[in-house]
Image (cartoon, rainbow, N blue to C red):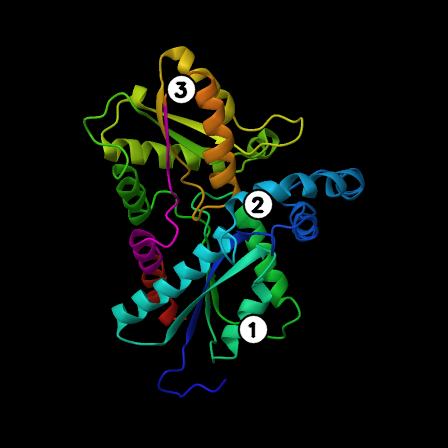
C-alpha cells in the first residue's frame, strides 16, 4: 500500500488487549488457552510441573466446558472483546487526527494472545510508513500477568531486528484523571446520587496472592482506583465494596472474592447491588458471562433483589477521550527523540 508523503503517518499507536478465541468452538478455545496459559507471566509455576497439567488435563477438559459460555456472549460475527477493541482503535484514530488536524498518527488494536497478534499489527502499520510506536496496554492497573506479558510480546516482535524503532510503552493509567472521570460517568448512568440503598461493587480480575506478595503493585492500584472513583462520586464507606473475581486453581488469590461477597451481601441486609469491573477495558467472557450471568444468579439466589452491571468503557466517547489524552500526552515528548 502506497502512502503519499503528505499523509504518511509517523507514529503508530497499538492498543493491546488480552485476546479471545477466533470462534466459540472447542478447537478455537483450546488453541487460545494453550497460548494464554502456557505463558509464564500468566501461570508462573515451574514448567515441568505446569505444562503436563496444562496439556494432559486442562486443554482436554476445559475447552468443551467453555463453548456454551462463549456462545452466550458472542456477537453476530465477532467476540465482543475484539469487536470493541477494533472500534475503540478506529474511533480514537479519528479523534486524534481531528485534534491535530493531521493524519500522521494511526491507531490499531492487537491481542497479546490470539489474533490480530502484536507482531502482525506492527508489520501492518510499518507498511504505511510508521517509524515510531506507542504501545498502550488496555489494562489500567499494572500486573505482571497482563502489562508484563504485553511487554514481553512487544519485545519478542522486535527481537530479530537489527535496529529497533523508537518506542514508548505505557505501563498503566489506574489513577489518570480521564480514566477516573470515564468510570464515574458510566456509573452515574445507573446510580443516582440520592440512591443510598444500592451498594456499588468494584470487581477486579484477581491474581494469585503469591504474585502480589512478590511485589506486584496490582492490588494497591486496584484499591487506589476504587477509592478515587468512590471519592469523586461522594460515596460513604458503607456504600461500596472492592472484590476480586475469576480465580482458578487451589492456591489463594486476592481477597475478598466477588462470588463469595455477592452470596453474603443479602445476609447483611444488602439486596441491591451495582457491579462495575474497572480493570476490563472492554466487555468479555469475564464480565458478560461470569458477572452478568453466574454472579448475578449467585446474588439473586442468596436473597438479593436487584442486580445491575455497568458495562465496560468499550468504544464509548469517554474511552475515546481517554485514549486520545494518553496519546497526545506521550506524543510531544516523543517529538524530541
Q: Position of residue 98 (x, y in %)?
A: 27, 70
What number is the disc on residue 304? Answer: 3
Disc 3 is placed on an element classified as: loop
Q: Is residue 145 visible?
A: no
* Disc 2 residue crowd, few under 14, some 14–19, many 20+, Cα 10 Å: many
Residue 143 to residue 87: above or below: above
Residue placed at 49% from the left, 33% from the top? 293
Residue 312 to residue 273: above or below: below
Residue 289 to residue 80: above or below: above
Residue placed at 37% from the left, 48% from the top? 313
Q: Which residue is mark 2?
A: 70
What number is the disc on residue 123? Answer: 1
Residue placed at 33% from the left, 68% from the top? 94
From the viewer's perspective, tell me whether residue 301 is left or right of residue 30: left
Of the numbered discs 2 and 3, the one sitting upstream in the chain is 2
Q: How far is the residue under mark 1 from the one under mark 3?
A: 51 Å
Q: Position of residue 96 (x, y in %)?
A: 31, 67
Queried whether the magenta region covers residue 154, the answer comes back as no
Quarter of the figure with residue 275: top left
Amino acid at each position: 500500500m502506497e502512502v503519499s508523503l503528505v499523509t504518511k503517518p509517523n507514529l503508530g499507536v497499538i492498543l493491546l488487549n488480552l485476546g479471545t478465541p477466533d470462534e466459540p468452538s472447542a478447537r478455537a478455545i483450546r488453541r487460545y488457552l494453550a497460548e494464554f496459559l502456557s505463558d509464564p507471566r500468566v501461570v508462573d509455576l515451574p514448567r515441568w510441573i505446569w505444562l503436563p497439567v496444562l496439556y494432559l488435563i486442562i486443554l482436554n477438559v476445559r475447552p468443551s466446558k467453555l463453548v456454551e459460555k462463549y456462545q452466550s456472549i458472542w456477537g453476530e460475527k465477532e467476540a465482543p472483546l475484539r469487536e470493541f477493541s477494533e472500534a475503540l482503535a478506529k474511533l480514537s484514530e479519528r479523534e486524534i487526527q481531528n485534534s491535530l488536524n493531521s493524519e500522521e498518527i494511526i491507531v490499531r488494536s492487537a491481542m497479546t494472545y490470539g489474533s490480530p497478534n502484536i507482531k502482525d499489527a506492527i508489520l501492518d502499520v510499518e507498511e504505511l510508513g510508521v517509524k515510531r510506536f506507542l504501545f498502550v496496554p488496555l489494562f489500567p492497573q499494572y500486573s505482571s500477568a497482563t502489562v508484563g506479558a504485553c511487554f514481553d510480546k512487544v519485545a519478542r516482535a522486535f527481537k530479530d531486528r537489527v535496529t529497533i524503532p523508537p518506542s514508548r510503552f505505557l505501563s498503566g493509567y489506574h489513577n489518570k484523571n480521564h480514566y477516573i472521570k470515564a468510570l464515574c460517568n458510566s456509573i452515574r448512568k445507573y446510580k443516582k446520587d440520592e440512591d443510598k440503598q444500592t451498594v456499588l461493587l468494584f470487581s477486579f480480575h484477581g491474581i494469585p496472592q503469591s504474585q502480589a506478595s512478590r511485589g506486584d503493585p496490582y492490588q494497591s492500584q486496584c484499591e487506589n482506583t476504587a477509592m478515587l472513583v468512590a471519592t469523586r462520586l461522594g460515596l460513604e464507606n458503607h456504600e461500596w465494596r472492592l472484590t476480586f473475581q475469576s480465580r482458578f486453581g487451589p492456591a489463594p488469590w486476592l481477597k475478598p472474592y466477588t462470588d463469595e461477597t455477592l452470596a453474603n451481601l443479602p445476609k447483611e441486609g444488602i439486596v441491591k447491588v451495582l457491579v462495575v469491573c474497572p480493570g476490563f477495558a472492554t466487555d468479555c467472557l469475564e464480565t458478560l458471562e461470569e458477572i452478568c450471568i453466574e454472579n448475578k444468579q449467585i446474588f439473586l439466589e442468596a436473597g438479593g433483589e436487584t442486580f445491575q452491571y455497568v458495562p465496560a468503557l468499550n468504544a464509548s466517547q469517554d474511552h475515546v477521550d481517554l485514549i486520545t489524552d494518553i496519546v497526545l500526552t506521550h506524543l510531544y515528548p516523543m517529538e524530541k527523540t
